[in-house]
Image (spheres, rainbow, N blue to C red):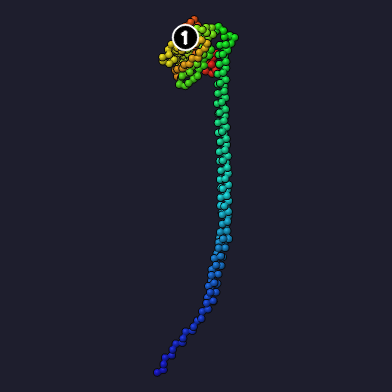
Amino acid sequence: MQPHALPPAPALRIVDPRRVRRQRLLLALCWLITVLLAWLVGRYWIFPSLDGPQAQLLDAHQQIDSLKERLSDAEQRAANLGRGEQIARLANENVQSVLADREATIAELRRDLALYNRLVGPQAAGQGLTVHEVVLTPAGQGVVSMDVVLTQTRDVRGGSEGHVTVSVEGQRDGRTQTLPWTELAAAGNQEGLAFQFRYFQRLQSSLVLPPDFQPHTLEIHVRSKGSDTVHQKLRWDQLISQGSA
């Protein structure tokens, strides 16, 4: 028998490492080129207007920042104006208060001067009991403060002594009504305001008016222990505004 023939040995393949690296680099470069081409196609063909919204968004943010800055400036100016107006208002109120105080002081000085002239002036000698001044000041809740100044220079040694009462005439429920002293004065002072002086005396009291009563005339009654008696009618509104001499 003849021996079997052996199969031929496989051919050996020699791989060049440098060639493999070049192939891999070439594939990577092709992949990068493909990605770049895809981005360019999408950027300039499929989505050609991406820059528009981005630019508009950036511009909108800038406008918002500008408006915020302008709003802040406007609020600051408004705050400054508000403080300026408040200062001006306070200054005006202070000036008005000072003027009112000065006017009240001047009015009081004028009353004092008139009283001084009544007592020591050329016409002062021999004057009997007189109502020099009546001033009414509303105090709220129907209460009215009353100041009365009496003078006399006829009997400076003996002086004058007696009582003062008032009555008030006005409208109530559409009818004329007169409130006597007993209804106007506080309890315990029914006889009237007592006085005793040589030259002058200031009397003070409070009158209580009903809530539905509208006064228009005040009548004052002065009775001394001597022969002097005074009855005088005065307009209510004149006594409220500037007093009466």
- Taking the spot 48% from the left edge, 21% from the top edge, the residue there is 139
Count of numbered tags: 1
Residue 217 horizontal/vertical position (percent): 50, 13
- Taking the spot 43% from the left edge, 16% from the top edge, the residue there is 186
Residue 31 horizontal/vertical position (percent): 54, 68
Q: Is residue 14 above or below residue 131?
A: below
Q: Is residue 220 above or below residue 2?
A: above
Question: Which image quarter holds the C terminus?
Answer: top right
Residue 90 horizontal/vertical position (percent): 55, 31
Which residue occupies the foreground of this view, 121 or 12? 121
Which residue occupies the foreground of this view, 121 or 172? 121
Q: Is residue 130 above or below residue 18?
A: above
Q: Residue furthest top?
A: 227
Q: In the drawing, does residue 103 fall left or right of residue 145?
A: right
Q: Is residue 196 above or below residue 87?
A: above
Residue identifier under label 1: 162
- Which image quadrant for residue 34? bottom right
Question: Which image quarter holds the N terminus?
Answer: bottom left
Q: Is residue 212 visible?
A: no
Q: Residue furthest right?
A: 122
Q: In the drawing, does residue 190 fall left or right of residue 55?
A: left
- Taking the spot 55% from the left edge, 16% from the top edge, the residue there is 112
What's under tag 1, amino acid-wise?
A: Gly
- Taking the spot 53% from the left edge, 78% from the top edge, the residue there is 16
Which residue occupies the foreground of this view, 187 or 174? 187
Q: Residue furthest left?
A: 1
Q: Is residue 202 visible?
A: yes
Instruction: Tell me the element at label 1.
Output: strand
- Crowdedness near tag 1: few (<14), some (14–19) or many (≥20) residues, C-alpha within 10 Å: some
